[in-house]
Amino acid sequence: MSKRRVGIVGFGHLGQFLATNLQENPNFELVFVWNRNPEALIGKIPSSLILRNLENLNTRKPDLIVEVAHPYISSKYGEFFLQQADYLMGSPTALADPEVEIKLREAANGNHGLYVPSGAFWGGEDIWRMADRNTLRGLKVTMTKCPQSFKLEGYLKKINDDVESEAITLYNGPVRDLCPLAPNNVNTMAAAAIAGYTLGFDGVIGCLVSDPNLRNFHVVEIEVTGLKSSNDENFTVHTIRKNPATLGHVTGEATFAAFVSSVISAHSKGPGIHLC
């Protein structure tokens, strides 16, 4: 069986971790790494793998392109990526923009698939199946981190900057409105909106909590509501995931390994959008 040829877009903590793992995995061949600042790759990536212009990535003939940079990448290059290869978007908050979601869903109806990593979103396949059966009635994702682990925009940044000794709820509402304000922090919520597609970005609720006393973990709570039973009680599932994390890091430690698993499973599902 031939090696799966993978290109990486972005070289932050996650991109570096992924590049190392792919080069050590005999089932994969790393064919390029792109970074906004290419000089940051020198000495860390073989020069032959450094791609300086994304528009030239077709010369590397990738089977899978993996974005671990910023939602902007998908909005600008997502369609182009899907013309060349399967595409795993590590920043699915880009899909909160209705125009981006529409054009990428259409592009994914061609020869390649669009993959969304589950990341810290526990139970995604089960929730997708509930959506398929039209039994999903509610989905809420609450993410709690220390203030230093948030990279926020607009008014949320100001609220977070003022957090002192007690936990503060920064946001509680539709995921669509939250994604542009926390594009690097709420990819888990974006994955929830994709899995629970009957609710989507407007129906899935996101809650962001800044807790200065939570210094060693990121906590993700998922609350699922299904149909009512014959005795008028709703089906419910409530999970709590505590992910060890270095103080100030956006991504928890377990998410790195989970992302590699997503890359491994991002193949052979054909056109369309897929959770992996």
Image (tube, helix red, strand yellow):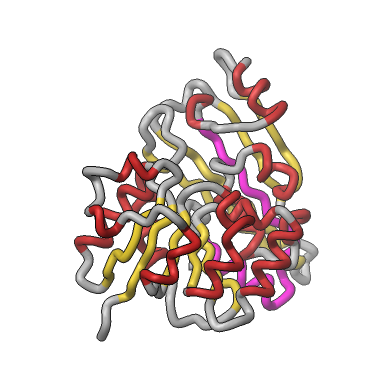
Instruction: Tell me: residue 18, above or below residue 177.
Output: below
Q: Position of residue 20 (x, y in %)?
A: 25, 54
Quadrant occupied by the N terminus? bottom left
Instruction: Tell me: residue 171, above or below residue 131.
Output: above
Instruction: Tell me: residue 187, above or below residue 197.
Output: above
| Quarter assignment of residue 152 | top right
Residue 133 magenta-highlighted:
yes
Of the pair 154 and 246, the residue shown nearer to us:
154
Q: Residue at x 61, y 70 (%)?
A: 128
Residue 211 magenta-highlighted:
no
Q: Is residue 125 visible?
A: no
Q: Residue at x 37, y 45 (%)?
A: 38
Q: Position of residue 252 (x, y in %)?
A: 41, 42
Instruction: Tell me: residue 79, above or below residue 165.
Output: below
Is residue 265 found left or right of 181 in the rendered image? Answer: left
Of the pair 46 and 87, the residue shown nearer to us:
46
Q: Is residue 3 visible?
A: yes
Q: Residue at x 61, y 75 (%)?
A: 108
Point out the stretch of residues depicted in magenta.
123-145
